[in-house]
Amino acid sequence: MRIDILTILPELLEGPFSASIMKRAQEKGLAEIHIHNIRDYSTNKHKQVDDYQYGGGAGMVMTIEPIALLIDKLLSERKYDEIIYMTPDGVILDQKIANTFSLYENLIILCGHYKGVDERIREIYITKEISIGSYVLSGGELAAAVLTDSLVRLIPGVLNDETSALTDSFQDNLLSPPVYTRPPEYKGHKVPDVLMSGNFELIEKYREEQAYKRTQERRPDLLK
Ligand code: ADE
């Protein structure tokens, strides 16, 4: 999978992809993440990428031209499955969306800033608008990193033990059961006996019950 991320703050995206699973996915050649600085495509002599909004009001708007030039360049090089805009008024990201997107070959993710992008960018280019939650971030970069992470870890071969993505919370609309490691007792809190029983049938049953119980208590909406 190739992901092209379009941003005016590329430095915000250096960290998330340079460690752990995201780094390994790129080293294994399973994910290619390209960060593009929108400012490099500004033809303005001050490299400006924003302007005042028509109709007045506080906050700048990201201008069409540099974003359009960059997207047109990418579109001339390959076909993209989706051109995604990260925005608080988009569809809320969930595991189902992550599963769907993880099957794609090429994605563009546009990060917004200030008041957002000129609406015509959305009309002309954007095929999906995604929010990572009902709160406003300073820009779309952290949201793009969250989306990218949620997709890349689902690409077959990225996780060492492929079943570990299948048993993630939400994969079957259930939260994950509690997990334990050594020591068997800490400050009077014991690991449940069944997990030490060696009886895999009982362990599986316990985990299913716990996943269901946890979902009912914390996210009953997932069971509907
Ligand atoms: N940009 C600013 N806030 C955002 C959010 N909640 N989700 C996606 N992009 C955003």
Image (tube, rainbow, N blue to C red):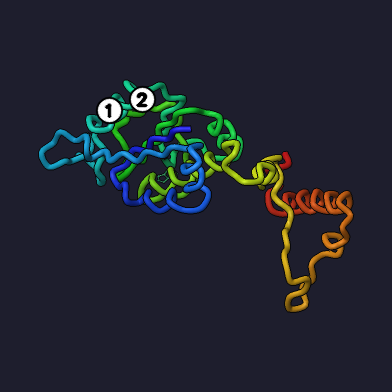
Q: Is residue 81 left or right of residue 69?
A: right
Q: Residue 29 at what x, y percent from top left?
A: 48, 37
Q: Is residue 124 left or right of residue 107?
A: left
Residue at 72% over, 39% down? 224
Q: Residues within 10 Å of mark 2 (few under 14, many from 20)?
A: some
Residue 43 falls in which quadrant of the image? top left
In contact (CB < 8 Å): disc 1 and disc 2: yes
| Picture quarter with ligand 1 | top left
Residue tagged 1:
68
Residue at 34% over, 38% down? 6
- Counting labels gives 2
Residue at 86% over, 51% down? 200
In the structure shown, which secondary structural element does the residue marked by tag 1 occupy? Answer: helix
What number is the disc on residue 117? none
What number is the disc on residue 125? 2
In the structure shown, which secondary structural element does the residue marked by tag 2 occupy? Answer: loop
Q: Is 23 above or below relative to 104?
A: below
Taking depth in this image into account, of 25 and 209 the one nearest to the observer is 25
Taking depth in this image into account, of 158 and 214 the one nearest to the observer is 158
